[in-house]
Image (cartoon, rainbow, N blue to C red):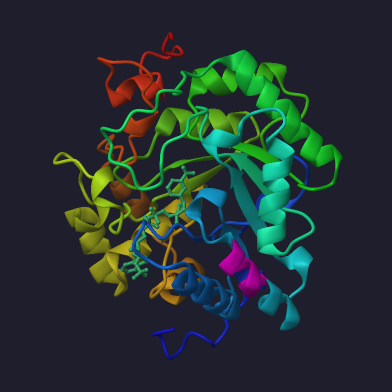
Amino acid sequence: MSNPEASVSLDPAAIPQRKLFTGATMPAIGLGTFGSDHVSASEIAEAVKGAAAVGYRHFDCASVYANEAAIGASFDQILRTGIKREDLWITSKLWNDKHGEDQVIASCRQSLADLRLSYLDLYLVHWPFPNFHPPGCDVSSRSPDARPYIHENFMRTWRKMEELVDLGLVRHIGTSNMTIPKLRLVLRDARIKPAVNEMELHPHFQQPELFRFVLDNGIQPVGYCPIGSPGRPERDRTPTDTAPTDDPVIVRIAMRHRIHPAAVCIKWAVQRGQTPIPFSTHHYRENLEGVLLEPLTDDEMSAIAAIDRNCRLIKGQVFLWKDGQTWEDLWDPNGEITSP
Ligand SMILES: NC(=O)c1ccc[n+]([C@@H]2O[C@H](COP(=O)([O-])OP(=O)(O)OC[C@H]3O[C@@H](n4cnc5c(N)ncnc54)[C@H](OP(=O)(O)O)[C@@H]3O)[C@@H](O)[C@H]2O)c1
């Protein structure tokens, strides 16, 4: 831990909470745990411990991040410090090569074993596309078994997600990287609806329509890459990408509040009504502190609302399923599910 103040706790009871349709509450800021291929599992496991010590209670994990076993050892230690399991909110995710009906429950059980937990607060289908691609592969890589979104198949996976709730292994289930037309179908056919949709959200990618849609349907938006993912792998970068932390509006507000532009992005996210899950091994304390101290003014919130650039950073190219497609096809830009 590089921050000498890291062990001085902020008040977890002061963290704003989101109410889910079940009545459960989820802390409105969590710690991301994807090391973007360059931060090791042990560094992230240390950050999880440090973050819990300063007051974080929400952790966003996934089997594909290949660090759940290390993070599980941290949870074990955290629970020995007197923090109760019911005070933590722990999310994990089903990876794309485990959508098969016989794989969902086994995959969740593996995450539970790795994380050393008896239940998850939230289990997400990480992407709506069943697809195997080797970890760390280039964006031009295409999987021979890549498939488009096929709703009947997704619902077969979703039935197993629902069974996880029935079994008491997870408290809530949710989606990630979805679009409005896909979510409409899931809402129509689900027995247990998604409690959360995890989606890219930062000042340069505000997704106003999807944001409104999920809230209107009683689904909480969890925002990934809330800072604009400055550490994301090279393969996820394109020349047209912009950085919200460089935006003059964000920089000006940061100077006014004497905080880092990253902390402004986190404050904005919480005040707007989403739940950011910033990854951090060095700045997690200041990100939480930013949420608890001096809010942004209405004028500052409006100024940030006006800098949306519709700049998606995580485009998902590796999920394309046929030649001649562009990544936009994955995101149903015309309001209809892109046909197979
Ligand atoms: N569902 C999905 O498909 C999906 C996709 C992508 C990400 N996610 C989740 O979302 C999480 C967050 O996304 P992300 O990791 O891509 O990006 P991010 O949270 O936007 O950015 C993380 C980067 O910002 C730096 N940072 C954090 N706070 C800072 C501060 N106050 N000042 C300066 N730098 C700061 C971190 O560096 P330090 O480590 O040095 O602090 C790290 O390099 C992931 O970890 C993962 O849990 C989910």
Q: Is residue 248 visible?
A: yes
Q: Can residue 15 be seen by looking at this rendering? A: no
Q: Is residue 212 above or below residue 260?
A: above
Residue lying at the far top of the rendered structure: 339
Residue 78 in the figure: left or right of residue 1: right
As for residue 71 lying within the magenta part, the answer is: yes
- Between residue 52 and residue 164, name the one nearer to us: 164
Left or right: residue 134 versus residue 230 is right
Residue at position x 38%, y 20% from top? 321
Establish if 63 lies above or below 77: above
The percent coordinates of residue 241 (x first, y second) are 20, 43
| Quadrant of res 151 | top right
Residue at the bottom extreme of this rendering: 4
Which is nearer the eye, 161 or 11? 161
Going 68% across and 16% down the picture, which residue do you hit? 188
Q: In x, y percent, where is residue 311?
A: 27, 38
Query: Is residue 329 highlighted in magenta?
Result: no
Q: Give the quadrant of the N terminus.
A: bottom left
Which quadrant of the rendered structure holds the C terminus?
Answer: top left
x then y, percent, for residue 173: 69, 39
Q: Quadrant of ligand 1?
A: bottom left
> Magenta region: which residues?
69-75
Asked if residue 107 is positioned above or below residue 258 in the image, the reply reads above
* Residue under the point 59% across and 18% down: 184
Q: Residue at x 27, y 21 (%)?
A: 326
Q: Main secondary structure of the magenta part?
A: helix
